Image (cartoon, rainbow, N blue to C red):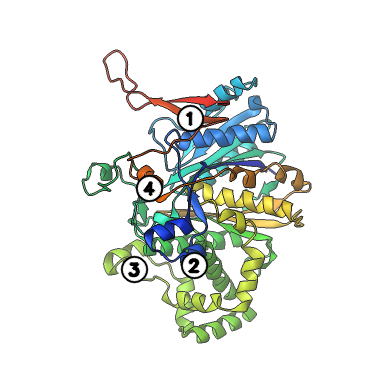
Amino acid sequence: MAGISGMALYVPRHRVRLSDWCAWTGNDWNKVSAVVGEGFRVPAGHENVYTMAANAVLRLILQYDVDPQKVGFLALGTESSTDNAAGAVIVKGMVDRGLALLGKPPISRQCEVPEMKHACLGGVYAMKAALRYLSCDGKDRVAITIAADIAEYERGSSGEQTQGAGAVATLLEADPKLFEVKLERSGSASDYRGVDFRKPFSRHFDPAYASSTRRLHDFPIFNGRYSTYCYLDAVSRAVEAMMDRAPGGRADYLETLAGILFHRPYEHLPFQALASLYVRQLSWTPAGRSRLEDLAQQAGADFAALLEEFESEPDLFGIAQDKGIDVDPYPELSKVVRALRKSPGFETFKKDKCTLGVSLARHFGNLYSASLPAWLGAAAEEAHERSVALAGRELLMVGYGSGDAAEAIPVRTVEGWQAAASKLGFRAALEGAIDLTKEEYEGAHDGVAPLVSEPTHEFIVERVGEAMEATFQDLGVEYYRYVAAQ
């Protein structure tokens, strides 16, 4: 069964520590630490989503000694593209030139190069496409997928502390060395959610759109509380669809898992999703339903209405349009979830199922499409460091893309997984951070003073074309170069 044989992480060196950001902005560090994490990375002036993706791919090839000529599928999942025509082929072009400078052959010319887009789910969709390729016409080849993004929000917005930048490259093979991916048991969910989180092209032409920021920027249009409702609803639906295909059905499936890893825009949201799933699962067995009734009573929730909510299919966008974006579509469930999260039993469950790799993931920031694969890699690396017995154990990956869509995919750790995990290098990828001052961060964010660093062993945007003539045009085309050393 096809699956994952290796992973590699790239993040920019420039870092904003959220403790510093809280001091600059007057926010409560204790609250931000608990809800968001430790910090986020900011790209230098010579970086973009394609350079980060290429850096991650080259690391992957070198760390896992991949034969580039065997790569038949190279897919990029992102919502941070700067070109609406080309995508993964830009990454391939960079990597080929970097490999040549290192005396290695290029990626095979017989290589598919798609780009996948659906908000933060692009990387998961790329992985599913790669697995289908390996199971069909690519059985004798290998595939590489990249999830890469730059998450940025306007200064002063509620999303500012949830920024970040980075890329994760994943090696997939028919005979995996790290995780088998149980694609045949995956669950999906999708529904149109209107004003959840969008990047409409026309916003760039409106003077009201972040007028204080001078550089080209990609701040989303978003509604935070409504987006949370959409996230919780979508991931629950996808997980329940997946559980219906699990051996033995839904009952007690979550308890069998070695870990549950969610799309992670910030620290707090996966734990909310875990609590919501836990409450829903209680309704599936007589013993669980008795526990659920007790919880509902403690929470002051109407138990009959709660059970009706579990069976309901609310139109979240319709509710938002008719009653406002802050209307909770599952009010009784929310009451019970709040009560559950205060209970010792849930804290034990959370620690057992949803904290592997978190101590490292807290430092990634919001990586959009790369958030889930980054947490998976961090979990595998921590498990190896701590000698956790994972062989044969199953983990659950839950991806989400605003707007919305979700995927729940089980992965099983293979025998001998430690050898592949020892090459991950996620912790090492975070080393050498350059902490920004308030002035440096604000200058870079607003386009007043782009960040400058000395690149070594990485790809850079060398220049951007300016020609728009009848005989030659390259206006806006980015030219790249691999810097082997200074």
* Residue 439, numbered label: 4
Q: Residue at x 76, y 43 (%)?
A: 419
Q: Secondary structure at mark 1?
A: strand
Q: Which mark is residue 460?
A: 1
Q: Is residue 388 visible?
A: yes
Of residues 82 and 33, the one nearer the viewer is: 33
Whichever of callouts 3 and 4 sits on the residue coming sooner in the sequence is 3
Query: Does residue 256 appear to the left or right of 292 in the view shown?
Result: right
Tag 1 or tag 4, which sits nearer the N-term?
Answer: 4
Q: Residues within 10 Å of mark 3 (few under 14, many from 20)?
A: some
Q: Residue at horizontal 32%, vertical 24%?
A: 475
Q: Is residue 108 above or below residue 59?
A: above
Of labels 2 and 1, earlier in sequence is 2
Q: Which mark is residue 30?
A: 2
In the rendered structure, which amino acid carries the disc numbered 1?
Ile
| Quarter of the image that includes the C terminus | top right
What type is the residue that disc 2 sits on?
A: Asn
Residue 142 seen from this side: no
SS for dot 3: loop
Amino acid beneath label 4:
Glu
State left or right for residue 130 relative to residue 88.
right
| Numbered disc in front, either 3 or 4 | 4
How far is the residue under mark 4 from the one under mark 2?
Answer: 23 Å
Q: CA distance from mark 3 to mark 4?
A: 35 Å
Q: Are marks 4 and 1 in contact (CB under 8 Å)?
A: no
Q: CA distance from mark 3 to mark 1?
A: 43 Å
**Residue that carries the numbered disc 3 in the rendered image:** 326
Which residue corresponds to the image point at 65% horizontal and 50% vertical from the top-left? 182
Calculate the distance from the C-alpha at mark 2 to the C-alpha at mark 3: 26 Å
